Amino acid sequence: MSVEVRVVDVADIEPLLVLREEVFCAEQGVPVELERDAHDATAVHLAAYVDGALMGTCRLLRGPELWKLGRMAVRSA
């Protein structure tokens, strides 16, 4: 099994957003309009791949003194 974590350019985050909607909206019942926000355009997005398949994602938001990790979603096995 190979695991790889990559930084994803904001122009290429659509698959990450789809995964987040699967986890937050479909599984947890979060309204779609609350899941995506303006921070997606400025965040650093990370994607985790297992054997080449997207399995997880999160975003990092830079604050004045520290970074905040959020919107962490992992596809169920």
Image (cartoon, rainbow, N blue to C red):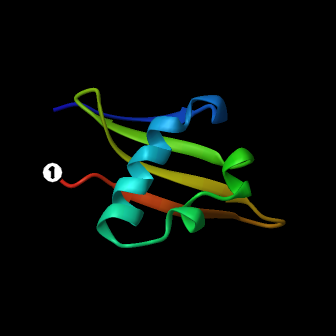
Dot 1 crowding, Cα within 10 Å, few <14, some 14–19, many 20+:
few
Q: Residue at x 62, y 55 (%)?
A: 60
Disc 1: which residue = 77
Q: Is residue 56 above or below residue 29?
A: above
> As drawn, which residue projects farthest toward the top?
52
Q: Is residue 6 above or below residue 33?
A: above
In-front residue for pair 75/60: 75
Quadrant hosting residue 54: top left
Q: Is residue 29 left or right of residue 37?
A: left
Q: Position of residue 30 (x, y in %)?
A: 45, 72
In-front residue for pair 3/29: 29
Q: Position of residue 12 (x, y in %)?
A: 57, 29
Q: Secondary structure at mark 1?
A: loop
Q: Position of residue 23 (x, y in %)?
A: 35, 60
> As drawn, which residue projects farthest toward the right?
64
Q: Residue at x 28, y 26 (%)?
A: 52
Q: Residue at x 15, y 51 (%)?
A: 77
Residue type pointed to by label 1: Ala
Q: Position of residue 69 (x, y in %)?
A: 57, 62
How many circles with numbers are drawn on the protein? 1
> As drawn, which residue projects farthest toward the bottom?
29
Q: Is residue 61 left or right of residue 28?
A: right
Q: Residue at x 34, y 72 (%)?
A: 28
Name the image quarter holding the N terminus: top left
